[in-house]
Image: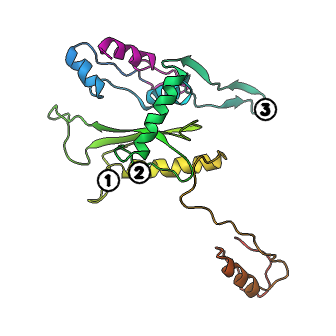
Amino acid sequence: MGSEKFLHYLKAFGFGEKTGIDLPGGEVSGSILYNYPIEQITTAFGQGTTTTPIQLMQAATAVANNGKMLKPYIIKEIKDAESGETISKGVSEVVGQPISSETAKKTLKILETVVTSKVGTGYNRYNLDGYTVAGKTGTAQIPDPETGRYLTGRENYVFSFLGMAPADNPELMMYVSVKQPELEDDEPDSAPSSFIFRNVMENSLRYLNIDADKEKTDPVNVIEVPEWKNKSTSELTESLDSLGATYEVIGDGEQNHGCKC
């Protein structure tokens, strides 16, 4: 690729500049350390140059959105408390197209192998039940201010994952970063970040009623609740037991007045 073209893409994806996200102060631009040949080399694998999580998210929107990079925003809308009229509204704004639609789709396919391939750095760790995932893992060293070198030890890293789902046509994107986690001896480095990603992402997709795009590994057992009105409690519980349903009996009356299934 060459150093000049690499720098071109870093800037095209918005690194080294503030995103302009609608948060009061606090955002920094980060910096692209690229003055000397050694800095160009270290930037290629992530050292020296600094970025923010929201910059990473903005850059990744280009991959998820057919090459078009979207400016992030927090506030959906602001309404007048008395009239209910909308004062301002957040909108999706295209702020660049660093790659083509074809390149974006190919990149999504490659990022999906991070989770599905046996040689992928996130293999079998960031899988979701019912949804495909495309993403990228990250492992960042932490500078030691006392020695000027990097900290050593299995836990002295920042472990991260940027994932999007469903992989072919992403609806949600999530970035998780965990600094210096306390790990068990038999626990993989990615355990904390993968636990957060799987639970939050999977529940969010279901909450938003986004269609699953792969077969569930743990299919839901759907049953038809039997008629319960005017039946005795024991009669109904026996019926539910035979169906393998999970239920809770509230109270100790003999006549059933309702059920929480």
Per the image, the residue denoted by label 3 is 84
Name the residue type under label 3: Gly
Classify mark 2: helix, strand or loop. Answer: loop
Q: x, y (%) of residue 80?
A: 74, 29
- Between residues 178 and 11, which one lies in front from this camera angle? 11
Image quarter hosting the C terminus = bottom right
Q: Residue at x 62, y 24 (%)?
A: 92
Residue 248 screen position, x and y as percent: 66, 76
Q: How is the image coloured?
A: rainbow
Percent x, y of residue 144: 20, 36
Q: Is residue 34 magenta?
A: no
Report the Cα–Cα distance between label 3 and label 1: 50 Å
Task: Check disc 1 and report its element: helix, strand or loop.
Answer: loop
Mark closest to the chain's N terminus, 1 or 2: 2
Q: Amino acid at mark 2?
A: Arg
Q: Is residue 191 above or below residue 255?
A: above
Is residue 253 shown to the viewer in this render?
Answer: no
User: What stretch of residues is rendered in magenta?
Assistant: 1-27
Q: How far apart are labels 2 and 3 at the CA level?
A: 45 Å
The disc, 2 or 3, on the residue closer to the chain's N-terminal end is: 3
Direction right: furthest residue: 230
Identify residue type, mark 1: Pro
Mark 1 near mark 2, Cβ–Cβ under 8 Å? yes
The residue to which callout 1 is attached is 188
Question: Nearer the viewer's eye, disc 3 or disc 1?
Answer: 1
Residue 243, relative to residue 29: is it above or below? below
